[in-house]
Image (tube, rainbow, N blue to C red):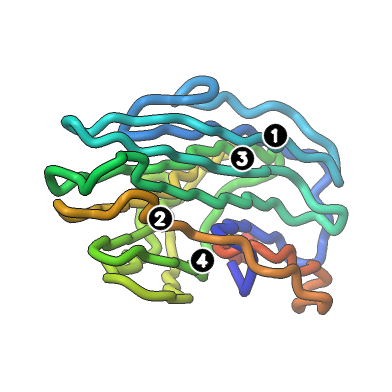
Amino acid sequence: MNLLSSTLLRAAAVAVALPLLGVSATVAINGVCVNGSCTPTPVTYGIGNSQSGSTSNGVLVGSDAYSTATTYSVGVSSNGGTFINFDPTVSYAGTAASTTTDTITVDLLASIYDAGAANWNGTYTENVPLVVATGATASAELFADGVGVGLVGPYGPGTYNVSESATLTGINGATLNYAYDFTFTFAAGTAPGATSSSPAVPEPATMIPAGLGLVGFGLMALRRRKK
């Protein structure tokens, strides 16, 4: 996943452009889908096409109110790689200090389909930027077909940009299911307006090897398909 914006996950094929891929994504807050189905069915897109969206939802944890917002896009780049950009933000929306320790999970679920793929084995790297509020913690991890790349965090208050890599095998078939999971925890006594996020970062202007453009979002998974 290279240095990209908030939470970009990118499964990038080598130099050969893929002729056709199917992709779809949905967002879940505390296990409840807020747009679409929690079991996304891949939709066919051609090279250079993408699906994008945003969510804005309130969530109540006990008697404490929070607001959540995400933006995301999933698609096939013009040079043949697949990508997912995901930027979640959680803010305490109460008018007085929070009463309990509260946990909010924000998950991006995505399916990528390539009719010509025998497997999706390879090296996956996640770069995860985090901005964590006072009295809060945050963590994140990318899963490919249920196998984690590596837990980032949990980290306390501050600003972070962390990378994890793993070589994954046994990911067979034409469809790859991703889950990109964030966990934000706010301690009792959190002040109104406290916000934790995985923010977008500026898009790099350079290119990475194998002819793939950097797409400027925080999580990027790099894989080389075995022939």
Which secondary structure, mark 2?
strand
The answer to whether mark 1 and mark 4 are in CB contact below 8 A is no
Mark toward the start of the polypeptide (3 vs 2)? 3
The picture places residue 206, in percent across and down from the top left corner, at: 82, 79
Mark toward the start of the polypeptide (2 vs 4)? 4
Amino acid of disc 3: Ile
Residue occupying the point 62% across, 32% down: 24
The picture places residue 227, in percent across and down from the top left corner, at: 66, 59
Q: Nearer the viewer, mark 1 or mark 2?
A: 2
Check residue 112 in the rendering and tell me which mark sits there, or answer none. Answer: 3
Q: Which residue is mark 4?
A: 124
Label 1 to label 3, Cα distance in Å?
6 Å
Residue occupying the point 57% across, 64% down: 218
Quick one: label 1, few (<14), some, or many (20+) residues within 10 Å?
Answer: many
Amino acid of disc 2: Thr
Mark toward the start of the polypeptide (3 vs 4)? 3
Which secondary structure, mark 1?
strand
Label 3 to label 4, Cα distance in Å?
15 Å
Residue occupying the point 55% across, 52% down: 87
